[in-house]
Image (tube, rainbow, N blue to C red):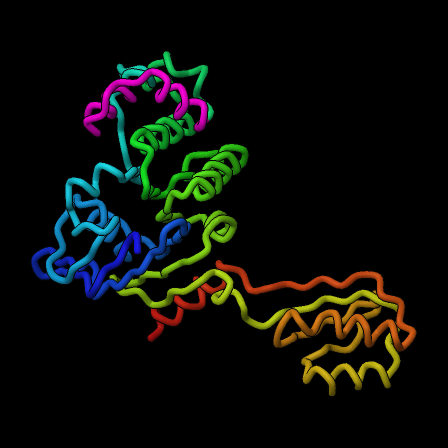
Amino acid sequence: MIIETENLVKAYQNKVAVNSINLSVEKGQIYGFLGPNGAGKSTTIKMLTGLVFPSSGKGQVLDRPLGDVQARAKLGYLPEHFRYQEWMTGEDLLNFHTSLYRLKRDPERNRNVLRRVGLLEQGNYKVGGYSKGMQQRIGLACALLPGPDLLFLDEPTSALDPIGRKDVRDIILDLQKEGTTIFLNSHLLSEVEAVCDHIAIINKGVIVKSGSMKDLLMGKVTLSIRCSPITEDIYHRIKERFDSTAAPQLEDGSIFMTLKTREEIPEIAALLTAGGIKLYELTPQHETLESVFLKVVGEEETS
């Protein structure tokens, strides 16, 4: 495991920020870590990166104990809130972070990370003149300097426009192909859904749900069908065969159904066409990460 924790707890005086956190992150995963504001996400990340020490529990990162210097040398970290020296150029900032990583200066490495984040032509500009999006990109460039085996990203697309968010998504997916493990925290759930293969949802300091993205989104499927008028016989056969909550056909030729799994979709299409029904459109709608998140967090808030 790249990250493994057991009953990790962090308390500040009388306040427990996170409680009994158990994580298992495998090599090459893009792991989404989600939760509302104040849920304990940033505290957990700070423990995993060695910036704060846990009050109790234990864990390993890159097969080393939490806070181990050798492990930290192969970590990249883009925090949510950062502020860089405005008088430095992008190149100066990369050289400064190179020294913090105790790496040798390498102009070619600087060019490579600048190219990767789309700032190759702006490396000589002062950071104080960067837009918010450019500052987010230079922060990501700093995190990529050591060629990390494990990359922590805390709200990496918060200041980016849609094009910038797509660029970061592409960077994340390319890094995964290269073998990098990525631990991602973001409030943009559509972005998380687009790139993550596993997630954990934390609320009030406790992980309330976790698993693979596929398993978490494998709820019932809502199916929208547009076709020629369905006969009473075909309609009743659909309801009996699929135990469906099919609604009566609307005037525009639409019918809506709730299915147990997506595997039932081709069977419905075959039944309709075999019955002489002309099928114009068949659109499945799956549960989204946002709906799962709101359901889980909402249940916690009302419990």
- Residue 282 at what x, y percent from top left? 76, 63
Location of residue 79 (image quadrant) = top left
Q: Is residue 43 visible?
A: no
Residue found at the far left of this picture: 13
Front-lying residue, 267 or 235:
267
Residue located at (47% from left, 60% from top): 213
Left or right: 241 as drawn, with respect to 51: right
The stretch of residues the image draws in magenta is 93-117
Query: Residue at horizontal 62%, vertical 69%?
Result: 221
Point out residue 133 in the picture as x, y percentages from the top left corner: 42, 29
Q: Which picture quadrant has residue 212?
A: bottom left
Which residue is located at x 19 percent, y 57 percent? Answer: 59
Vertical position of residue 272 compared to residue 106: above or below: below
Q: Is residue 96 magenta?
A: yes
Q: Nearer the viewer, residue 12 or 32?
A: 32
Q: Which residue is at a point 47% across and 25% down the rendered structure image?
A: 118
